[in-house]
Image: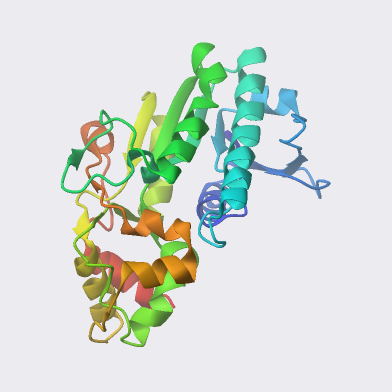
Amino acid sequence: MKVVIAGSSGLIGTALKESLNADGHDVIALVRRESRGPQESSWDPASGRIDHDLLASADAVVNLAGASIGRKRLTDSYAKVVLQSRLDATGTIARSLADHDFAGVLVQGSAMGYYGDRGEEKLTERSGAGSTLLASIVTQWEAAAQPAVDAGVRTVFTRTGLVLAPHGGFAERLLPLVKRGLLRSLGKGDAWHAWVALPDHVRALRFLIDSEHRGPVNCIAPAAVRDVQLMRALSEAAGRSPGVSVPAWALRIAIGPAIEDLLSSQNATPGVLSRLGFQWDLPFIDAAARYVTEQR
């Protein structure tokens, strides 16, 4: 199988590329510099430059490209960068696929931020978009793939939750505090988190490539957990007792508006993955927490 990946240097993209390569698939990474061999292809999403023939020849295109949300303060100016980077990348890919008779699948990155802060509401793929800043960004991000959808390309929107991994992502920012026994919860601790272990997320992406599904998919573990449950699981896996709750106001000062994604409550279920018969290797938070901490 020939798979083209945009955003292959990120946490999920790197793991997906390694998984596909290990099984002998032909993986080509889209890079924003001069390519360094046959497994790379240079592109410039801001100007719309891309190798149309490469995309048209692929069995699957996976688009995970976009400026990082978690590594910088989400100021008004940086929020525009985050959004524009996603619109440029997604629009460039979607228009190319629509214009060149693409017969494969587009796996389009998305996020649980689509739902915003929903309290105790049970969320499925049928639930509407939220009203937060991140919900607005994700909604526009998904909409940028519409040219491919309109052209009949099978398009899957992978709404990703908090990705638990030994290095990178959510754990990289919070585990140092957890391991020092300094973090009981973010805010009050009653927010729901939809989460997924990195190996299961990669397996889900590959599962969806091979499926016939089109449309949104909540790429998360079977059951969301309260914030305080998540922090307790990580603390116990690290051999520490939970520390103190960090007030929301302190988090907003230290991290900025990006913290709203971690403070938002999203009690979501992976309805599509369950219906399609996907099996999780790490479906429970205690086992996932041990995977994260034991690998560090």
Hey, which quadrant is residue 252 in on the image? bottom left
Residue 152 visible within the image: no
Which residue does the image show at 26% across and 82% down from the upper left?
244
Task: Answer with left or right where residue 12 lies relative to residue 250.
Answer: right
Q: Position of residue 202 (x, y in %)?
A: 43, 49
Where is 137 relative to 295, above or below? Answer: above
Q: Nearer the viewer, residue 38 or 89?
A: 89
Q: Quadrant of the C terminus?
A: bottom left
Which residue does the image show at 52% across and 20% down from the upper left?
146
> Total number of numbered labels?
0
Where is 66 relative to 150, above or below? Answer: below
Where is 151 relative to 45, above or below? Answer: above
Task: Answer with left or right where residue 227 lies relative to residue 214.
Answer: left
Q: Position of residue 119 (x, y in %)?
A: 20, 48
Q: Which of 69 and 167 is in front in this view?
A: 69
Q: Position of residue 29 (x, y in %)?
A: 67, 44
Residue 81 visible within the image: yes
Where is 244 relative to 254, above or below? Answer: below
Task: Answer with left or right where residue 141 lies relative to residue 262.
Answer: right
Which residue does the image show at 60% across and 33% down from the upper left?
87
Q: Which of 4 and 157 is in front in this view?
A: 157
Render colour scheme: rainbow
Task: Answer with left or right where residue 237 lies relative to residue 207.
Answer: left
Q: Quadrant of the N terminus?
A: top right
Q: Where is residue 129 in the image (x, y as percent from the top left)?
A: 34, 33
